[in-house]
């Protein structure tokens, strides 16, 4: 994506609870970046950011949650991810998680959420169409 495709929506800095959040658009997708720790003290910041992102989303374009900068993900954060996943599904909006670090991936794996959530290694992969959409287009062009 070209930088001109980005438009800041409502960046915020919530350093008082150990979590910084910024939100922007890439084309029609909403991208939310979290940096810091997601625990009982910062979960309200996460909840607010997720609600805003889902409110700004336009199906079928994704909401991308960039968790690469998260150093700790507690059960409160896992619960918010589950709630966001359910809300996104209800409004037919793809929810994609960008995560590569053990501090985020391990809790998702242990709880089984890694099997439910659409986890991608980077923003570029998160912005790509779903694999099943690509397969459908390949089938159409080969037949």
Image: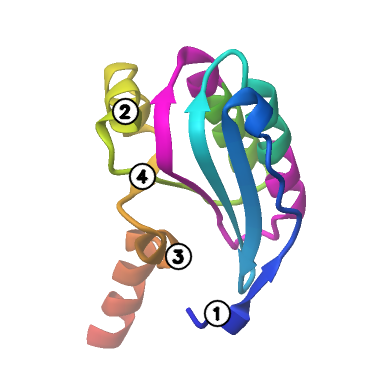
Q: Are marks 2 and 1 in contact (CB under 8 Å)?
A: no
Task: Point out the frontmost of discs 4 and 1.
Answer: 1
Q: Position of residue 126 (x, y in %)?
A: 41, 59
Q: Position of residue 97 (x, y in %)?
A: 43, 45
Q: Are marks 3 and 2 in contact (CB under 8 Å)?
A: no
Task: Point out the frontmost of discs 1 and 3.
Answer: 1
Of residues 39 and 64, the one nearer the viewer is: 39
Q: CA distance from mark 4 to mark 1?
A: 23 Å
Q: Considering the numbered disc 1 on the image, is that residue within a helix, a strand or a loop?
A: helix
Magenta extent: 51-79
Q: CA distance from mark 1 to mark 3?
A: 14 Å
Asked whether residue 143 is in view, the answer is no
Mark 3 lies on residue: 127
Tell me where residue 9 sits by quadrant.
Answer: bottom right
Residue 119, label in figure: 4
Residue 103, label in figure: 2
């Amino acid at each position: 994506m070209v930088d001109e495709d980005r438009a800041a929506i409502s960046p915020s800095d919530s350093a008082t609870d150990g979590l910084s959040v910024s939100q922007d658009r890439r084309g029609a997708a909403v991208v939310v970046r979290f940096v810091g720790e997601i625990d009982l003290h910062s979960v309200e910041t996460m909840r607010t950011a997720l609600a805003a992102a889902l409110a700004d989303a336009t199906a079928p374009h994704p909401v991308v949650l960039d968790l690469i900068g998260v150093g700790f993900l507690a059960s409160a954060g896992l619960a918010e991810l589950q709630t966001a996943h359910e809300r996104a599904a209800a409004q037919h909006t793809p929810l994609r998680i960008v995560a590569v670090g053990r501090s985020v991936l391990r809790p998702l794996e242990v709880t089984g959420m890694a099997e439910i959530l659409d986890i991608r290694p980077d923003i570029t992969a998160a912005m790509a169409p779903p694999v099943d959409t690509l397969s459908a287009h390949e089938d159409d062009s080969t037949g």
